Image (cartoon, rainbow, N blue to C red):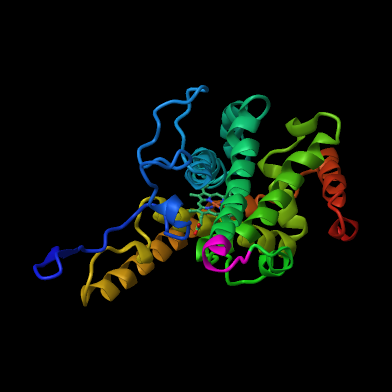
Amino acid sequence: MADYDRDGGLQEMEPSPVEETPSGSKEDYFSSQNDVENPSQPIRSSTLGLSQHSPIWYLSRIQKYSSYVFTAYGLAHIVNTSIIPLITRSVPESERYLLLTRPYYQGIPAEPLLIIIPLWAHVISGVALRIVRRNLNAKRYGDSGNKEDRKKSFFSSDFWPRVSGVSKLGYPFLPLLAGHIFVNRAIPQQFPGGQSNVNLSYVAHAFAKHPVVSYAGFSALIGVGVWHITWGWAKWLGLTPEQVTVQGGERELWKKRRWYIINALAAAVTGLWMAGGFGVIGRGGLAPGYIGKMYDQMYQRIPVVGKWL
Ligand code: HEM
């Protein structure tokens, strides 16, 4: 409830949640009517037909909507590599479904549209957001305008936005996913027949031949990825513990409750993925004859560790 101070004529307002953290400059956060760069109401259209907003507005939306596209791909991927194997209980049976859906996400234009562009857009917009917010903080809280000071303060941790838990998971997710794409997509392309050589039995072969590396690698990829995506979605939906709007004594209880629910959900999805991935594909065994030999040669192409495989 808002309080009205009769003597001072001031009105005390309840804090209300806003979409962006007020780390921007005053003009960015509370844009004035006369400000051409940051109008309080977006100018409906410019010469390009685009409405005008701050870089933070555009970058936040690129970061958010690119993850929607990648989520659609992730859902198809968990179906193919875990849920169908769990239903069929057989690698060759599951293979048929993988081959059926593959044309929808492999090749041009599906692959750049569903995977490559959204992935880069998500990561680059996240880093760019961080730099833009740092520069706004520096302008607002410290930058003297002196060139030397500016150079020094770029590395000062004072102005950089806090790295959230979601972001901390996002960075290790990147090399894990890049490694996964390299082994399953880039290496097979170097062999006659390309991607058509590779399917679930390629992964089963790795589990049978190199169990330690395979279990460790896939556990890290699935765990980090699922936790990042689950907490990421909680953030987009306004459901993280920090986004609790309840005030007073109940607040801590709600925060705790949300923390447990999000982690339980992430654990359940990780468990599901591992059940199908490890329990069925992981136990599929070595590929026979010529195919098995070709898979061995493929795994030997992995930089650094390849020579021991
Ligand atoms: C698929 C669904 C995804 C969702 C819902 C999602 C969600 C998010 C969210 C909410 C943030 C912002 C964290 C914050 O500002 O506190 C973020 C940042 C990040 N994400 Fe994702 N993400 C997804 C996929 C990915 C993928 C596939 C990668 C890379 C492999 C990735 C890498 C990153 C990185 C590196 C950051 C940190 C950017 C920064 O703040 O510096 N994300 N993600």
Viewer can see residue 233: no
Q: Is residue 249 left or right of residue 89?
A: left
Residue 96 in the image, given as x and y percentages of width and height: 59, 32
Q: Residue at x 47, y 60 (%)?
A: 23
Quarter in which the C terminus is drawn? bottom right
Pick the front one: 86 or 228: 228
Q: Is residue 156 magenta?
A: no
Residue 65 in the image, given as x and y percentages of width and height: 48, 40
Up/down of 240 relative to 29, above or below = below
Pick the front one: 168 or 215: 168
Q: Main structural element of the magenta stretch: helix, strand or loop?
A: helix
Residue 182 in the image, given as x and y percentages of width and height: 75, 46
Viewer can see residue 3: yes
Q: Residue at x 37, y 66 (%)?
A: 242
Residue 267 in the image, given as x and y percentages of width and height: 46, 63
Q: Residue at x 87, y 48 (%)?
A: 301
Q: Is residue 209 left or right of residue 263?
A: right
Q: Which residues are magenta?
A: 137-144
Q: Residue at x 55, y 42 (%)?
A: 77
Number of numbered tags placed on the structure image:
0
Pick the front one: 87 or 47: 47
Pick the front one: 154 or 10: 10
